[in-house]
Image: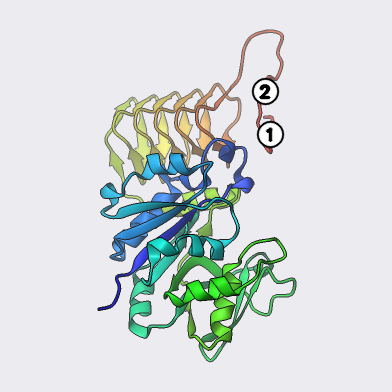
Amino acid sequence: MRAPLKGLILSGGKGTRLRPITHTSAKQLVPVANTPVLFYGIRAMAEAGIHEIGIIIAPETGEEIRAAAGDGERFGVRLTYIVQDQPAGLAHAVLTAEPFLRDSPFVMYLGDNLLQGGIADLVQAFDRDEPDALILLTPVPDPEHYGVAELHDGSVVRLVEKPAQPQTDLALVGVYMFRASIHAAARAIEPSARGELEITDAIQRLVDVGRRVEPHIVRGWWKDTGRLEDMLAANRLVLDTIEPSVQGELVDSQVDGRVVIEPGARLERSTVRGPAVVGAGARLTDCYIGPYTAIGEGCVIRNAEVEHSILLSGSIVHDLAGRMESSLLGRNVRIGRDTRQPRAYRFLVGDNSEIAIL
């Protein structure tokens, strides 16, 4: 009897490109359309019929991820948490998870990635064709920043991590399918120049010893949400798929287009133009919320305009002279104009922040 397919989600990265947000929160829990990025991966696996999922966590952020995702019951899956002591590469993560995976084939999914349409078709192709590995690829304009695949007659013949001179534009998307042979391949490789066990080297090892590695070209969109611009783009793409739902309270306010107003939110003399989502318990007064904005739960916006932005829970924006746009605010951030004299700018700003003065 064939071993059931398992899932492995990698959520141990430090998220240096999203600092200062990730100084205090795991990057996989930063929300897109008010849902943590990690949850999209869990749901994609559940929808593909995968019910046993291991989540690789780091010592620093693991407890936060455990608290957010729980045991997996609400997703219809069972979650097992696996601590990776150091970020030593994706192949190292596979070896760390070997006691959980055993001999099962599995899907490996990077926890900060979003993939349109889920992975059900990928699972079906893997079951049908039975390769040793199936890797997702997508054409990108800057392949030198990714692992790149070279193909011949429909099979993968070479993989290179961040090549200086890419031979193709086919980048590895952060979703892979493997059989148990990947464990031996991961043990057979040496750390790369950056000191990590690269999954591209492990897959190349499979190719070198005659194992079958097949490509699967992604036709929809894919986003690695590791940078601000990617988070905003992912937020925009997901909001484009929402269905309107107004469960909060509207007082002399209006919503236009695809807008979600979650329970307990209250809008007074405000306009929300979709696609947009306003989280539970938010308070909007005398303001305008433009398209592609996600307002987290408990946020307060007063006398301000916000567009194409993500506000995490508890943030306050008030009395701005101009529109705030293309912004990502962490939890409990406060931005506003102070009327006290003398007029001066007052900031408390974390590492790697950026502020544009109106």
Q: Specify the amino acid type for callout 2.
A: Phe
Residue assigned mark 1: 356
How far is disc 2 from disc 1 in space, using C-alphas?
Answer: 12 Å
Q: Which residue is mark 2?
A: 347
- Which of the numbered marks, if any, corresponds to residue 59? none
Residue 60 drawn above or below residue 177: above
Q: Position of residue 122 (x, y in %)?
A: 39, 73
Seen from the viewer's position, the closer of residues 207 and 128 is 207
Question: Which residue type does callout 1 highlight?
Answer: Ala
Decide if residue 189 is on the left or right side of residue 234: right
Residue 135, visible in the rendered structure: no
SS assignment at label 1 = loop
How far across and how far down the image is residue 357, in percent?
Answer: 69, 30
Percent x, y for residue 238? Answer: 42, 53
Q: Give the residue at x 52% y 34%.
A: 306
Q: Name the residue at 47% across, 72% down.
A: 218
Q: Is residue 298 above or below residue 191?
A: above
